[in-house]
Image: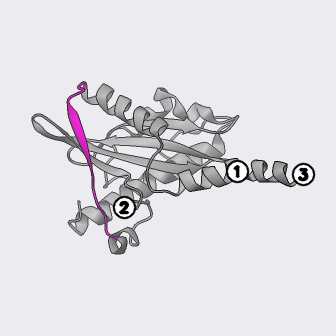
């Protein structure tokens, strides 16, 4: 009986270690690479982690401490930036990607991994296109300039809040000349 209890907790412990290790899983990294390749229409690019100090990270709502803000460069120089985030849904979390142009204007976004039975509609390109063109100077608010999705209210609110917090954080970091 004790042996079964140990094996029951092993997946939970592994999930916690992977979730908080600071590095992204290979699965997420592959999806990020695929999206960057697709958006910029090139396989010839490199990424570099944009370091945000703990002091500056403490000033913003978005999390920047897990190597999740990347600069993307191609043969002609800077292409843009990518942010990999995680947001809560009803009982789990989902991972998402936001690709910015050079001026930190949202170029595209994608739900990378959705872990719920309901609410996955937030991953549709049609719904996500609402964020394209938004910048650090824009407010995004559920019900005002972001549409609801029937059956996905919690996830819609969560994704909207995550994007809003990210844009507000970018504004603060830009004002402090961190980015």
| Residue 173 percent coordinates (x, y) | 29, 64
Task: From the viewer's perspective, tell me whether residue 44 is left or right of residue 166.
Answer: left
Task: From the viewer's perspective, tell me whether residue 94 is left or right of residue 35.
Answer: right
In the image, what residue occupies the spot 63% across and 39% down?
A: 115
Q: Quadrant of the C terminus?
A: bottom left
Is residue 142 something that shows in the picture? Answer: no
Among numbered discs 3 and 1, the one appearing first in the sequence: 3
Q: What element carries label 3?
A: loop
Q: Is residue 120 magenta?
A: no
**Magenta stretch, main secondary structure class:** loop
| Residue 8 percent coordinates (x, y) | 78, 48
| Residue stretch in magenta | 41-53
Frontmost residue, 148 versus 12: 12
| Residue 78 percent coordinates (x, y) | 16, 42
Frontmost residue, 13 versus 71: 13
Among the 4 quarters of the image, the one containing residue 136: bottom left
Q: Mark 2 points at which residue?
A: 169
State the mark number for residue 10: 1
Binning the other alpha carbons within 10 Å of mark 2 as few (below 14), some (14 to 19) or many (20 upward) gives many
Pair 2/3: label in front: 3
Task: From the viewer's perspective, tell me whether residue 116 is left or right of residue 134.
Answer: right
Q: What element carries label 2?
A: helix
Among numbered discs 2 and 3, the one appearing first in the sequence: 3
State the mark number for residue 1: 3
- With respect to residue 167, does 94 lie above or below? above
Labels 2 and 1 touching (C-beta < 8 A): no
């Amino acid at each position: 009986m004790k042996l079964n209890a140990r094996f029951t907790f092993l997946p939970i412990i592994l999930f916690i270690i992977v979730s908080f290790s600071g590095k992204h899983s290979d699965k997420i990294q592959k999806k990020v690479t695929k999206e960057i390749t697709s958006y910029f229409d090139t396989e010839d690019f490199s990424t570099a982690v944009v370091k945000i100090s703990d002091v500056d990270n403490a000033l913003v709502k978005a999390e920047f401490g897990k190597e999740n803000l990347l600069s993307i460069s191609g043969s002609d120089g800077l292409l843009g930036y990518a942010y990999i985030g995680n947001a809560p849904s009803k009982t789990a979390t989902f991972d998402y990607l936001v690709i910015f142009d050079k001026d930190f204007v949202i170029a595209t976004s994608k739900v990378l991994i959705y872990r719920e039975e309901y609410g996955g509609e937030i991953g549709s390109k049609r719904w996500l296109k609402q964020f394209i063109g938004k910048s650090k100077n824009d407010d995004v608010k559920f019900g005002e300039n972001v549409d609801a999705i029937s059956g996905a209210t919690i996830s819609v609110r969560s994704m909207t809040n995550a994007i809003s917090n990210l844009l507000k954080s970018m504004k603060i970091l830009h004002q402090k000349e961190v980015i």
